[in-house]
Image: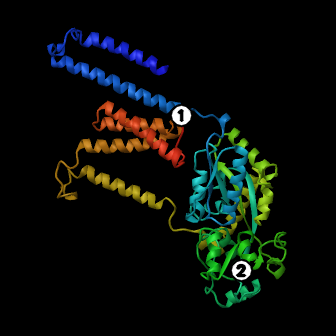
Amino acid sequence: MVLLVVDRRFCSLHSRLFQSTAPAVTFPEKNSLRKHSGTELMNLRAIIRVSVLSRSILCCLLLLMSGCAAESIEDYPDRPITVICPWSVGGATDRTSRQLAVFLEQELKVPVNVINATGGRGVTGHSRGLNARPDGYTVAIITGELNMLHWQDLTSLTWHDAEPIMSLVDGAGAVFVKQDSQFKTIKELRDFVEQNPGKLTATGTAAGGIWHLALAGWLDFCGLNASDIKWIPMNGAGPSLQELASGGVDLVCCSLPEAKTLYESGQVRCLGVMAEEPLAEFPDVPTFASQGMDWNISGWNGLAVPKGTPAPIVEKISTAVKKITDGEITVQGKTFPESMRDAGLSTRYRANDEFAVFLEENDETLGKLLTSDAFKKMSSRGTGPLVFPGLLAIAMCVILGCLAVQKKVHALAPDVSKDTVTSQGIVNTALVLLGIVAYQLFAEQLGFLLTAGAIMFLLLWKLGTRWWISALITVCLIPGIYTLFANLLRVPLPRGVLGW
């Protein structure tokens, strides 16, 4: 119906255009077109071309609008949710993420996908999760490293950039060796390290991560140097335990549940757990305290969303997670607490404000430890995370400056012709850069389709493409890009206030 009305309006417009622009154009007899001038025929062709193009563009826009309904908080969630896990497959954090995703799918009735964003000692995953758009469609699994990274000058990200939802796992650290290792107790390990500093290698997480901190803290507690055991960085407990099983390292520090499979199969031996009391799931494993070393530390993880997420969405997620952790939802006959218990994971549920209080206290505790004399080398960096991007930005400015003045200073480019760099070329380059800046500024508010479409049309037009060709390319290309990345590849593109 809309197209019919639009078509009639175009027909009426054509009639008025015919009367005003080509009053002498009539078709009373065969070959009558020959009587008219070339200018009149060109006007006629232009009118017909504009009419067809306009209707084509309008049809594309109407089809696009039909699939881009504006979303509202009340409709949340109406599309897939992504869970960002900062550590690799196989560890406690990964298993927690995947268990939670299954139950969230059941409760929220939308697909929930887990992405392992590893690297940067945890910076990559935490940044990707907490710097995402605060729309509830990207949630983050945060770990103890969040309260460590900023003390180590690796990132400015802190727990204040998160909206805490629920803490999930709180597992004490433990030390593992291969079953055929010469070490039977933690005391034997300590004595060996004291006599042979730097001979043993260990892993469990990234350098400066929670398990590295746990092992180094124990060494410092024993009066040894934190570097007396060489630490090999790994992206989580999963690959670390595989390295131990293959003989690549001498020991691994991680939580007991993360090593449950290898431990129960007899491939690794646990020398002790860094807890005040034996774990209920592993009562036969001695604590460090029972062996005369009152040292304990634990690694934790929990769910959070980016700061600024609307309160109603936070409430919906919190309510769903509360029902899941309370065991009100079952998947294949099991509740979430039962699934976590079967996986050997020690759970500790702290909701919202209680979780926020824990994060603040944990951040303060780890900050004191990381800034102490024993860990100054571990917690310091010669360069910050923005040094290299800053150097690249400076280099680009220098290059652009040289290009801008090379006409005046021939020594900068003696073999370049005078017409290589023109004022119009500099203007075109500036327009492209302005387009990038405009996208960064307005994409979140207007959405990908409107922002990218407007920028592409204006750039094509300003660079010399006819306006109708620019419009046709924009209408055909931008929706195709959106469909490919947002719908097929599930890349979260900005949707804006209209849901586009």
Res 225 → quadrant: bottom right
Res 229 → quadrant: bottom right
Q: Is residue 283 left or right of residue 473?
A: right
* Of residues 14 and 238, the one drawn nearer to the viewer in this rendering: 14
Q: Residue at x 51, y 31 (%)?
A: 65
Res 204 → quadrant: bottom right
| Mark 2 crowdedness (10 Å alpha carbons): few <14, some 14-19, many ≥20 | many
Q: Is residue 51 above or below residue 244?
A: above
**Mark 1–mark 2 CB contact (< 8 Å):** no
Q: Residue at x 39, y 36 (%)?
A: 474
> Which element is circle 1 on?
loop
Earlier in the chain: of badge 1 and badge 2, it is 1
* Of residues 190 and 462, the one drawn nearer to the viewer in this rendering: 462
Q: Residue at x 18, y 13 (%)?
A: 32
Residue identified by numbered label 2 = 268
Residue 483 seen by the camera: yes
Q: Is residue 421 above or below residue 458?
A: below
* Of residues 409 and 5, the one drawn nearer to the viewer in this rendering: 5
Q: Residue at x 75, y 49 (%)?
A: 321
Q: Is residue 452 left or right of residue 461?
A: right
**Residue situated furthest front in the rendering:** 30
Residue identified by numbered label 1 = 68
Q: How many marks?
A: 2
The amino acid sitting under disc 2 is Val
Residue 346 seen by the camera: no
